[in-house]
Image (cartoon, rainbow, N blue to C red):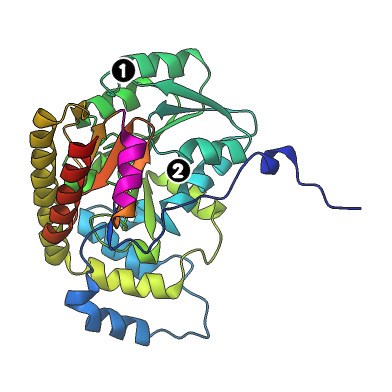
Amino acid sequence: MAYELNKKLKSIEPYETLPVTSPVRLDANESCYNIADKIGDIIGKAVKDIEFNRYPDPTAKKVTEAFATFYGIKPENCTAGNGSDELIFLILSSFLEKGDTVVTLSPDFSMYAFYGFLNELKIRNLPKEDDLKIDVGKVAEYCNNNDVGAIIFSNPCNPTSLGVRRQDVIRLVKNVYCLVIVDEAYMDFWGESVIDLTDEYDNLVVLKTCSKNMGMAALRLGFAVAGDKITTALRAAKSPYNVNAVTQAAAAAVLNHKSLIMEYTAEMINSRKQLQNSICELSERYFTIEKVYDSVTNFVFVKTPKAQEISEKLLSRGVAVRYMGSYLRITAGTEEENSIFLREFREILSLL
């Protein structure tokens, strides 16, 4: 008799990405700089000193302290995870029970609803306003009137590139009874973080990743920052050796070079501004570009009814961008990558 998968697993498919063979990859919001080009020897020495026959530090003490120092917060408030994805899954599976309600916003990072579904939670996906912004008052009212266990959203938002101001996030946290999970993966490109407030609000969790401005996507490292009660529970619920020793050693070495990270971050912000300005100029000539959103991230979000056709033509020319329905999400790259994209994008637009 053949083994039968349950209905939940039958209804999902593996996550797919674009081929990694594209010479210009502007589809995954990664850093366009390989930090190992500057400090590869230091990272290599840190990895060489690992005792590979031993399990990693279950508390990830050294890298957690380096992360906390980077942001000026207490290491006691930080829990390391195997990427933010592990932490999202851990929080939803541990702090909510089967049948509890989690609120997500639309559009937003798709994995929030996916992990909620895997944990058999009720997903309430609230649409954003027509301008893709969040009405904090409406969201708070919904949460308080519908027995919501948690709300999770990215700020700034992936994919819209828009952000919610610090005072509005605080207003949301103060006015709801549920857990508020703020994914600040792209916050280092802006400056409206609430990471310093987790001791003040016991229902606030801030997620951080080392994959974006820090340029460590290959290492898969994220952190959950929260007050004592939530942090103690998270550390109790997580797997004992969830962050491997190579990631811990390499990331600690990188985090100790804050000035280099900040230099790259500033360059990525400048790259995004130049890319956005160039696309805005094209939108004045080619009306198939309906809107270019005012980004506070390392990518540009563009509305066009020709999104699929444009993305496919770009890919055939060796340029990968992210197609999302009526939108394109374009990561800011190096000066050369941006130049190649704009050249191909301009030519494709002229032929539509």
Does label 1 or label 2 sit earlier along the sequence? 1
In the rendered image, residue 91, in percent from the top left (x then y), is placed at 50, 43
Going by the numbered disc 2, the residue's amino acid type is: Lys
Q: Is residue 174 magenta?
A: no
Residue at the image point whose x is 73% and y is 38% from the top: 7
Residue at the image point whose x is 52% and y is 77% from the top: 55
**Can residue 95 be seen in the rendering of this structure?**
no
Element type where label 1 sits in the image: loop
In the rendered image, residue 73, in percent from the top left (x then y), is placed at 25, 52
Question: Are circles 1 and 2 on residues that touch, CB within 8 Å?
Answer: no
Residue at the image point whose x is 68% and y is 44% from the top: 9
In the rendered image, residue 334, in percent from the top left (x then y), is placed at 15, 59
**Can residue 276 be seen in the rendering of this structure?**
yes
Left or right: 38, with 209 as reference point: left
Compared with residue 267, is residue 327 higher up or lower down, i.e. above or below?
A: above
> Which is more foreground, mark 1 or mark 2?
1
- The one nearer the camera, 342 or 47, is 342
Q: CA distance from mark 1 to mark 2?
A: 34 Å
Prevailing secondary structure class for the magenta stretch in the rendered image:
helix
Q: Is residue 314 magenta?
A: yes
Q: Which residue is mark 2?
A: 229
Among all residues in the image, which is located at the extreme front? Answer: 351
Element type where label 2 sits in the image: helix
Residue 210: assigned label: none
Left or right: 351, with 271 as reference point: right
Q: Quadrant of the C terminus?
A: top left
Q: How would you rate the neighbour count of disc 2 (Cα within 10 Å): few for under 14, some for 14-19, many for 20 or more?
A: few
In the rendered image, residue 233, in percent from the top left (x then y), is placed at 51, 47
